[in-house]
Amino acid sequence: MTSLALHQTAYSSPAQEPAIPVHWRARLNALRMIALECRTAASADLFKACAMLSNKEDTARDAHARALIKCLAPAIGHRPVFFRPGVEELSFDEAWLMRAIDAAKAADLDSMAFLVRSRVPKLFQRHVAFLIKGISEQFSQI
């Protein structure tokens, strides 16, 4: 019978999964940068922001994200938590937003509607969904 050294084991522990899925990293860091910029800006009215965006076809990539981040606090009832770009942790607000964007990108409208309804009052749901769908389309190259 042979003994194993302490640093050798008969089985190895599974590798830890990263806290943030790889396919979210670039999009999440871009949203975090926008959230940093919007932190000191005044919050915007959700209805006015959506009306302004819906009439422009050549909207910049960040416009939907800026509008959503500026309007998200009144829509969800508290200031959303966004970590600095590159942070390996994921806040509940970031995870919710990334899942909603993924659902919109996959055209899974039922999942996106569920996610929006789970946190946003009925008055704001259509506008928040519009902005999330816009982000999924505008950030499709990321």
Image (cartoon, grey):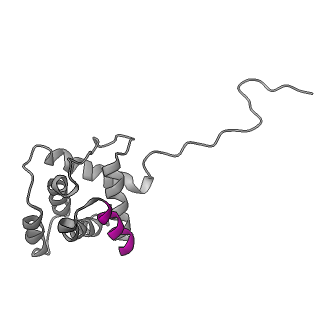
Q: Position of residue 8 (x, y in %)?
A: 74, 29
Q: Is residue 107 visible?
A: no
Instruction: Please name the predominant secondary structure of the magenta segment in the image.
Output: helix
Is 82 rendered above or below residue 70?
above
Q: Position of residue 109 (x, y in %)?
A: 35, 74
Q: Residue at x 45, y 45 (%)?
A: 19
Q: Residue at x 74, y 32 (%)?
A: 9
Numbered range of the magenta stretch: 107-118
Residue 112, magenta (yes or no): yes
Q: How many marks?
A: 0
Q: Position of residue 87 (x, y in %)?
A: 35, 40
Q: Residue at x 42, y 48 (%)?
A: 20
Is 88 rendered above or below residue 133?
above
Nearest the viewer among 142 and 91 is 91
Q: Residue at x 37, y 60 (%)?
A: 99
Residue placed furthest toward the right:
1
Q: Is residue 40 visible?
A: yes
Q: Is residue 136 left or right of residue 108?
A: left
Is 129 rendered above or below residue 32?
below
Q: Quadrant of the N terminus?
A: top right
Is 75 rendered above or below residue 17?
below
Q: Position of residue 4 (x, y in %)?
A: 80, 27
Nearest the viewer among 121 and 140 is 121
